[in-house]
Image: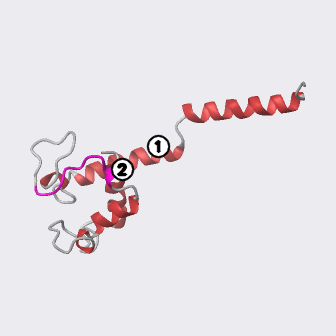
Amino acid sequence: MRKPANVIAAASAVAVLIGSMTMIPTQTALADDDLVKQGKKIAENRKKGNCFGCHAYKGVDMPGNIGPPLVAMKARFPDKKKLYNQIWDATSANPSSIMPPFGKHEILSDKEIKAITEWAYTL
């Protein structure tokens, strides 16, 4: 049985659209990349996150070893909100944590914690 030309044309248009979507970065993807870069910058700022003072992660020289290494973060925190909450106030999940409650004590803003969360999720 032969398919009508308009069905074939529609299917071809969808295939082209899907193919082009994978090749061209979206505005959201570009914004996410910028957010990851901002997060890394904040995380490595000694007056802000200073994450490497306690954590080891790929690319850092002379990291601290007080906190766990920042590896496989997506596997360790499948729910990104839990990672955000950990940075916001680690003592809510573990009252004995020595990690500063960055959000609770207003060390970092909500926007900064979101950026660090996006960066950490790439590790």
Name which residue type carries label 1: Leu
Left or right of 90 on screen, residue 33 = right
Where is residue 45 drawn, in percent x and y? 20, 53
Residue depicted at 68% across the width and 29% down the height: 16
Where is residue 51 drawn, in percent x and y? 19, 55
Where is residue 19 drawn, in percent x and y? 62, 30
| Observer-nearest of 96 and 19 | 96
Which range is magenta? 66-76
Q: Is residue 35 above or below residue 11?
A: below
Q: Which residue lies under the disc numbered 1? A: 30
Among the two numbered marks 2 and 1 on one chain, the one whose residue lies closer to the N terminus: 1
Instruction: Examine the structure image and report whether residue 73 is included in the region drawn in magenta.
Output: yes
Quarter of the N terminus within the rendering? top right
Q: Which residue lies under the disc numbered 2? A: 74
| Callout 2: SS | helix
Where is residue 112 drawn, in percent x and y? 32, 60
Per the picture, the main secondary structure of the magenta-coloured stretch is loop
Task: Looking at this view, name the residue that lies furthest to the top.
Answer: 2
Left or right of 51 on screen, residue 73 = right
Left or right of 20 on screen, residue 66 = left
| Observer-nearest of 58 and 4 | 4
Name which residue type carries label 2: Lys
Instruction: Examine the structure image and report whether residue 87 is included in the region drawn in magenta.
Output: no
| Observer-nearest of 94 and 9 | 94
Q: Is residue 119 above or below residue 14?
A: below
Quarter of the C terminus within the rendering? top left
Local crowd size for mark 2, using a 10 Å CA cut-off: few (<14), some (14–19), many (≥20):
some
Quarter-wise, where is residue 58 in the image?
A: top left
| Callout 1: SS | helix
